Amino acid sequence: MPEGELCPPLLIINEIPEKLRVSDRQILTEAIIEGKRAEQEGRYYHPAANGKIDEMTNGYSSEIQLASLLDNARLAGQIESSR
């Protein structure tokens, strides 16, 4: 693409590997309950649900989310440098 020309938005899904994901159904169920409670209180669902998952996994969920963020940043850099 010529320099300065706009390109359409691009969404790439770079998933957390299945073996690393939180799969405990009790944790996920409690996170959903916490997210819905937050909504009923006028707060946002996702921060409350993610906070509950993080609490119940002793920070593990934050670690894998950070690793995923860093992986996505590396991928974005690779894509950009190949253009």
Image: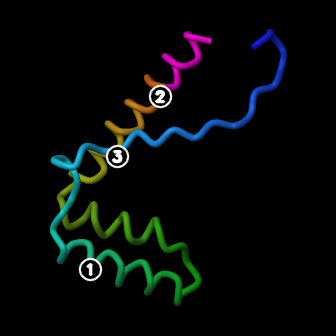
- Three-letter code for the amino acid on which mark 1 is drawn: Thr
- Numbered label tally: 3
Q: Position of residue 81 (x, y in %)?
A: 56, 10
> Which residue position is annotated with label 2?
73
- Three-letter code for the amino acid on which mark 2 is drawn: Ala
As drawn, 56 above or below 7: below
Magenta stretch, residue numbers = 76-83
Q: Position of residue 27 (x, y in %)?
A: 21, 72
| Residue under the point 84% across and 15% down | 4
Q: Is residue 13 left or right of residue 10?
A: left
Instruction: Bin the neighbour count of mark 2 within 10 Å (Cα to Cα): few under 14, some 14-19, many 20 and up.
Output: few
Label 3: which secondary element: helix
As drawn, 50 above or below 43: above
As drawn, 68 above or below 51: above
> Which residue position is annotated with label 1?
29
Which tag, 3 or 1, sits closer to the chain's start? Answer: 1
Depth order, front residue of 39/2? 2
> Which residue position is annotated with label 3?
65
Q: Is residue 70 left or right of residue 76?
A: left
Q: Are marks 2 and 3 in contact (CB under 8 Å)?
A: no
Label 1: which secondary element: helix
Q: Which quadrant of the view contains residue 26?
A: bottom left
Spatial CA span between label 3 and label 1: 19 Å
Q: Position of residue 43 (x, y in %)?
A: 55, 77
| Residue under the point 26% across and 72% down | 28
Q: Quadrant of the C terminus?
A: top right
Q: Position of residue 40 (x, y in %)?
A: 52, 90
